[in-house]
Amino acid sequence: MKTPKCPKCSQPMEEGFILDQAHNFQSAEKWVEGPPQWSFWTGLKLNGRKKRQVATYCCPKCGFLESYATMED
Ligand SMILES: [Zn+2]
């Protein structure tokens, strides 16, 4: 994918991702299809949901963040 430009200051943005540090392990944030549904036993219900990796671009000048769902996973 082409590097996006910041919509506020037109700087080329840097690719990265949002770190998810829940449950004492580190992973990258993911996009999940549909609204969140909670289960008392397992927390969020994710059975059969479509998930995609999320790439987040950051503007080095103003810090604006822009996220894109990338490949399915
Ligand atoms: Zn900016």
Image (cartoon, helix red, strand yellow):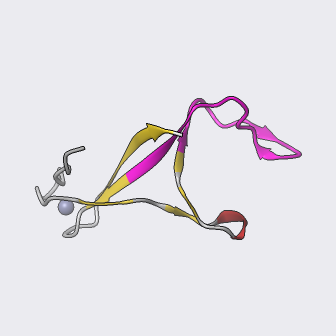
Outermost residue to the right: 41
- Report whether 3 appears left or right of 44: left
Work out whether residue 55 or residue 10 is closer to the camera in this orientation and state it: 55
* Residue 63 screen position, x and y as percent: 28, 66
Asked if the stretch drawn in magenta spans residue 40, the answer is: yes
Where is residue 60, by image quadrant?
A: bottom left
Q: Residue 11 occupies which quadrant of the picture?
A: bottom left
Q: Please give the range of residues in magenta.
A: 31-55
Which residue is pictured at 41% across the width and 41% down the height?
69
Residue 71: where, in percent of width, then height? 43, 39
The answer to whether 69 appears left or right of 21 in the picture is left
Tell me if 7 is positioned left or right of 51 in this view: left
- Asked if residue 40 lies left or right of residue 58, the reply is right
Q: How many badges with numbers are in the image? A: 0
Residue shown at the point (19%, 69%) measured from the top left: 61
Split into 4 quadrants, where in the image is the C terminus? top right
Residue at 19 percent across and 46 percent down: it is 2
Q: Where residue 23 sits: x, y (%)?
A: 72, 65
Q: Is residue 49 magenta?
A: yes
State the image coordinates of residue 21 (x, y, percent, origin top left).
61, 67
44 lies above or below 47:
below
Q: Quadrant of the N terminus?
A: top left
Ligand 1 rendered quadrant: bottom left
Q: Nearer the viewer, residue 44 or 54?
A: 54
At x 66% / y 68%, what residue is drawn?
25
Q: Outermost residue toward the left?
A: 10
